Image (spheres, rainbow, N blue to C red):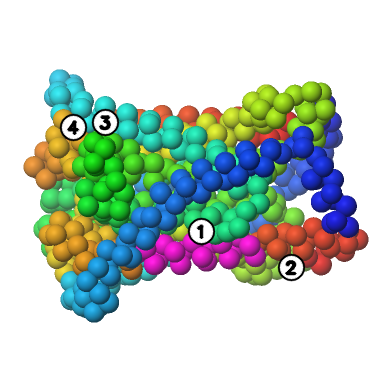
Amino acid sequence: MSAPQKVIRRANAGTTEAPWVRWTLIGIALLFMFLFLILPLAAVATEALRKGFGAYLEALKEPDAWSAIRLTLITAAIAVPLNLVFGVAAAWAIAKFEFRGKAVLTTLVDLPFAVSPVVAGLIYVLVFGAQGWFGPWLAAHDIKIIFAVPGIVLATVFVTFPFIARELIPLMQAQGTDEEQAAIVLGATGWQTFWRVTLPNIKWGLLYGVILCNARAMGEFGAVSVVSGHIRGQTNTMPLHVEVLYNEYQSVAAFAVASLLAILAVVTLVIKSVIEWRHEREMKAIAELPPERPATV
Amino acid sequence: MSGVTSSALSSATAPLSRPGRRNNRVLPGFNLTLGYALLYLCLIVLIPLSALVFKTFTLTWDQFWVAVTAPRVMASYRLTFGASLIAALVNLVFGLLLAWVLVRYKFPGKKIIDALVDLPFALPTAVAGISLTALLAGNGWVGQYLEPHGIKLAFTPAGVVVALIFVGLPFVVRTVQPVLEDTEKELEEAATSLGATRLQTFTRVIFPSILPALLTGFAMAFARAIGEYGSVIFIAGNMPMISEITPLIIIGKLEQYDYAGATAVALVMLVISFLLLLVINGLQGWQRRRSES
């Protein structure tokens, strides 16, 4: 069946360009990608390994590097689940119900994406910093938020706030409420409906949002830089540690830590692509089902 | 013509979907999830953002005006907005090209290229900053070929543009790509059979249909570039009046404990971000209406 289609497409000069135009456009696009995306990645790898693999490993064994890695993991481990719970709750309310002010709420969810990371850090300094709203009270109770781990977590939560919600809202809106309503009418509780009906439907979108949220949480620089105070071995996350090393002209060490973050980015892209391909395949499988049996999907 | 049939279709199906909507309170959890979402939104986003506004009120109007229009601050606006505009324009052109090539053509490695487009979303900005600087510095892979010709990118305003092109690259591609995938080839065939050249078909048939998406992507890339900090500070050189971006002005004021001054400049940036968010929302609404009709 595909063979005749191909013949038609090839004969159809009206919807494509001459080969030389095609290949020129592809060539320019690939050159642009090479210069702006592949070269920077390659540069991280070569700079990190400039003095050999031994020096690379030594740089990663530094106690300060370790503490930066630990802090980054802790931050992501707190920020991502918080935004996951919010994302599911917000998407459930927005996608499954009609209420006034829904459009405003949807816009507000996106707001942190519009705010500069530096401004995001600044607002927490204004609330929790020494001269901020709660500054004197916090100082009196010996609680440190700014220039300490809680501030870093808060700033990270802010910048990664919309990721999961904005992935789930359109997905759950497109899926509608029919399946959930059927489950409720058949006697399922709200939780059962969520776990058995909604969650399986949104699992890929959810995972997609989580890995993007995680990548940003581990890589955030601007917002965290404002609230961290740059105390070596204590409040430096991996991106901040990269900056410190780079400014101290420890190029190999800086790129060694940076290479871990680059690996994280590549792994994120791989997982993301796998999710997309899986989703596409599921969509195709649903589309190919005989029309008399749609209920089994 | 297809617009007429589809709108007739949608008006025919609309009454069918309405009863479902009215019944949707069958589902539980509305109060809980909306309440939690609002509480979390207020605690994490709205209350801290309002601190910015309240802190600015501690300044008199004159103090505020002096803080946000000082020559060094004005120079930073010029750089931030100018470089962001140039970078977003470059991304507009190359983003459209990339989306076009990825949707319409077949070539080896296409899936990998498609996945790589999102690299700037996944790669931490600090990493992008130091690696672009290493590439463009006088002894870097790219810089060593440019500097003999008098083209200096690292530690100049031009370097800022390069970093901002990097961070904004995925936006136009990812907004245009799905729209391009949905365009109907029949329209192009009709244009061709009516005697249009391929270029005419593109400018008169395809381009108008992707214009809303293109502008949305452009505005998103521009908005992202204005706020960008991590990738820029490594490559910019950060010379006052020349290569100092506005977010760095805020950091500088904070380091001198000038909280009010930092807040005033931050408020200017926040207001601009708000406006851009509204523009982007408007563009997305336009795009949605376009794709529905």
Camera-side residue of A175 and B165: B165
Pair 2/4: label in front: 4
Q: Amino acid at mark 1?
A: Gly
Element at label 1: helix
Please name the residue shown 54% across and 46% down the image.
A27
Q: CA distance from mark 2 to mark 4?
A: 68 Å
Instruction: Judge the density around disc 1: few (<14), some (14-19), many (≥20) Cα neighbours within 10 Å.
Output: many
Residue B67 spot, x, y in % from top left: 16, 27
Please name the residue shown 41% across and 62% down the image.
A265
Vertical placement of residue A277 versus B231, above or below: below
The residue indicated by pointer 1 is A209
Pair 4/1: label in front: 4
Please name the residue shown 29% across and 33% down the image.
B80
Mark carried by residue A45: none
Instruction: Judge the density around disc 4: few (<14), some (14-19), many (≥20) Cα neighbours within 10 Å.
Output: some
The residue indicated by pointer 2 is A187
Q: Is the Cβ of the residue at disc 1 closer than 8 Å to that at disc 3?
A: no
Q: Is the Cβ of the residue at disc 3 closer than 8 Å to that at disc 4?
A: yes
Mark carried by residue B242: 4
Q: CA distance from mark 3 to mark 4?
A: 8 Å
Residue A125 spot, x, y in % from top left: 21, 48
Q: Amino acid at mark 4?
A: Ile
Q: Which picture quadrant has residue B48?
A: top left
Instruction: Judge the density around disc 3: few (<14), some (14-19), many (≥20) Cα neighbours within 10 Å.
Output: many
- Taking the image as shown, residue B247 lies to the left or right of residue A163, namely left
Vertical placement of residue B209 versus A205, above or below: above
Q: Earlier in the sequence, mark 3 or mark 4?
A: 3
Q: Is the Cβ of the residue at disc 3 closer than 8 Å to that at disc 2?
A: no
